[in-house]
Image (tube, rainbow, N blue to C red):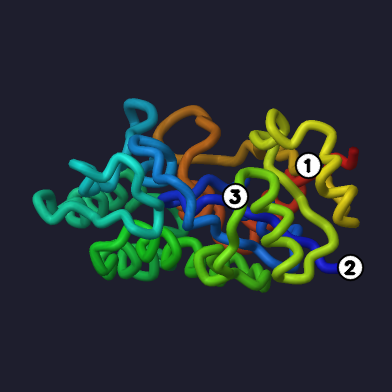
Amino acid sequence: MTTAAIMQPTYLPWCGYFGLMNLVDIFVIYDDVQFDKRSWQQRNKIKTPAGSQWLTVPVESKGQQFQKINDVKISLQKDFTKNHIKAIETNYSKSRYFKEYKSLIFECIEDNKNSLVDLNYSIITTISKILCIDTKIIRSSELKISGKKEERLVEICKKIKANSYISPQGSKDYLADGSIFKTNNINLSYFSFLHPEYTQINGSFIAHMAVIDILFNCGSDRAIELIKQSSLIEKI
């Protein structure tokens, strides 16, 4: 049985993103759907002594109301790379594993090719390697799939020959009972993540930070161990 998951590419994803990735054989980065400005696709949070702080990638959006994620260009008017690297360095330089992983993360941010999806793809694949997740990662735009919502998800599964699909919780609203998956002989289940608590610098614990938080504080071995322990599958 081949299991798949389909997720939009987010910037510096949280640890649950990699929990889902670790559970499947093929992880499809859903990059040919409409871009949602001011969403996780272009921003995420890091922890500071004053609480959480947003890191947002500036993008060109004027006159691009209906652009797809893989068409989004990073704005050249603001040099976000220096600001993001400075913010990460300022708030994590004293964490135990910062020196071990900082170069790999910073290289991804600096080498963004002015493309949001390329930036996110680079970060996602780099962190998956750091965490020793060997799941195959592909982009949906490479598959040339048509259709809408759940129809597209089914067609992607069929195209990559996946007969089991693990969906994020957020898709429950429109997938309903998953009858379209049953009709196409695809097993449907849902991903659930019980966020682990671990020792952070900068005060008391705050959940749902960018994955670099657990990586810099815990190291890759402990991070993936916690991620695996927190990942659950809900069958329907």
The residue pinned by badge 1 equals 190
Q: Do tag 1 and tag 2 residues touch (Cβ < 8 Å)?
A: no
Residue reaching furthest to the front: 147
Q: Find the residue positioned furthest to the left.
A: 77
Task: Give the mark nearest the N terminus, 3 or 1.
Answer: 3
Residue type, mark 2 in image? Met
Quote the CA–CA distance across marks 1 and 2. Answer: 17 Å
Q: Residue at x 61, y 62 (%)?
A: 28
Question: Pointer 2: what residue?
Answer: 1
Residue 12, image x, y percentages: 43, 51
Q: Exactly how many numbered labels are in the figure?
A: 3
Residue 64 in view, yes or no: yes
Q: Residues within 10 Å of mark 3 (few under 14, many from 20)?
A: many
Name the element at disc 3. helix
Q: CA distance from mark 2 to mark 3?
A: 22 Å
The disc labelled 1 sits on which kind of residue? Tyr
**Is 131 or 156 nearer to us in this picture?**
156
Q: Is residue 70 left or right of residue 24?
A: left
Left or right: where 51 falls relative to 82: right
Question: Does label 2 or label 3 sit earlier along the sequence?
Answer: 2
